[in-house]
Amino acid sequence: MGIFNKTKKEEKKTSEETTSVALKTPAVSLHDTRASGVLLDPRITEKATDTAEKNIFVFNVAPSSTKQQIAQSVKEVYNVTPTKIRITKIPRKSIFMKGKKGFTASAKKAYIYLKKGDKIEIV
């Protein structure tokens, strides 16, 4: 019954503290951590690991990003300059699972070519 014994002053203080904290800390999503949300995450597949041996790295990128934005974000995050960038779109596909029809999400990926001595460390 201790929950109901709070006074109005204590309730006001707790509500003011939570709103002030919420206003001070901006909402940060996972996509905003890497150069303004252009590079979403490295694409880790069998093909991508094979191409990494040839200094070609694959990343999932934002659907509205351009080659110039991708090059700039790679420079900021990994401190390497790409020599060439190729972009491909991954279309959505229709699937049928457990008696229901649905769609997979569409996406965009970028192949980033680097010089012979440059490397990107993906953990």
Image (tube, rainbow, N blue to C red):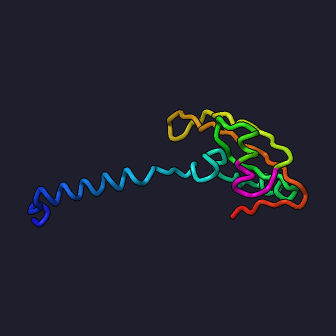
The C terminus - image quarter: bottom right
> In the image, is 68 to the left or to the right of 61?
right
Is residue 99 placed above or below 116 in the rendered structure? above
Tell me what residue is drawn at x 76 percent, y 55 percent: 46
Residue found at the very far bottom of the displayed protein: 2
Tell me which segment is drawn in magenta.
73-81
Measured from the top left, where is residue 78 in percent x and y?
73, 57
> Which is nearer the eye, 1 or 83?
83
- Image quadrant of residue 38? top right
> Which quadrant is the N terminus positioned in?
bottom left
**98 or 18, which is in the foreground?**
18
Residue sitting at 69 percent across and 53 percent down? Answer: 42
x and y, in percent, of residue 110 in the image:
75, 44
For the residue pair 14 and 89, the one nearer the viewer reads as 14
> Looking at the image, which residue is at 61% across and 46% down?
36
Give yes or no for residue 77 being in the magenta stretch: yes
Q: Considering only vertical position in the picture, is 123 above or below 20?
A: below
Residue 103 point in image, percent of width and height: 57, 35
Q: Is 10 placed left or right of 81 in the picture?
A: left
Q: Quadrant of residue 49?
A: bottom right
Q: Is residue 113 above or below residue 7?
A: above
In the displayed structure image, the side of residue 101 where residue 67 appears, left or right: right
7 on left or right of 21: left
The total of numbered circles placed on residues is 0
Residue 60 shown in magenta? no
Q: Main secondary structure of the magenta part?
A: helix
Please state the horizontal and vertical placement of residue 89, each as a whole percent of the image: 71, 36
